[in-house]
Image (spheres, rainbow, N blue to C red):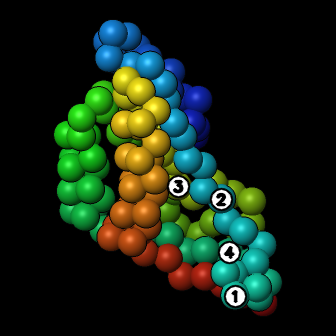
Amino acid sequence: MVTLQGMIDDLKKRLDPATVGMFACHNGVVRATSRDGRPATALDIDCDRDAWDRVLTELRSRPGIAAVEAYLHTGRRTVGEDVLLIVVAGDIRENVFPVLEEAVNRLKKEAVKKKEWTA
């Protein structure tokens, strides 16, 4: 199973320590309520891989960024299960935090397809 710690450990093995001063992470999980407050039981998750690759390629080219890795758990995910994992590695927080936020927002908007199951 893919985990944030596993993603970080892999990056630490591959990246030049001279270019990495921090890792910033996102771990999205299935909430028990929808955004409008209704009880939720599950999400069906799918991905547009072309859009996914396009977003990651663009973000990896940003100044100070050594790596952007993301993993999407597809299929049916129930309350409390992981959905979207993202790790951004880079030199300083002023470069890394904005890329993490943009990665979350853009991947969810441009590449992730979901259907929410509510009670």
State whether residue 35 is above or below residue 78.
below
- Please tell me which residue is depicted at 68% across the width and 75% down the height of the picture: 42
Which residue has dot 3 on it?
A: 84
Which residue has dot 1 on it?
A: 36
Mark 1 lies on a secondary structure that is loop
* CB atoms of marks 1 and 2 within 8 Å: no
Foreground disc of the pair 1, 2: 1
Name the disc covering residue 29, or none: 2
The quadrant of the image that shows the C terminus is bottom right
Residue 108, located in which quarter of the rendered image? bottom left
Q: Amino acid at mark 1?
A: Asp
Q: Amino acid at mark 4?
A: Ala
Q: Which mark sits nearer the N-terminus, 1 or 4?
A: 1
Foreground disc of the pair 3, 4: 3
Name the disc covering residue 42, or none: 4
One can see residue 10 in this view: no
Mark 3 lies on a secondary structure that is strand
Residue 41, located in which quarter of the rendered image? bottom right
- Please tell me which residue is depicted at 24% across the width and 40% down the height of the picture: 62
Mark 4 lies on a secondary structure that is strand
* CB atoms of marks 3 and 4 within 8 Å: no
Q: Amino acid at mark 3?
A: Leu
Q: CA distance from mark 4 to mark 2?
A: 10 Å
Q: Amino acid at mark 2?
A: Val
State whether residue 62 is above or below residue 105.
above
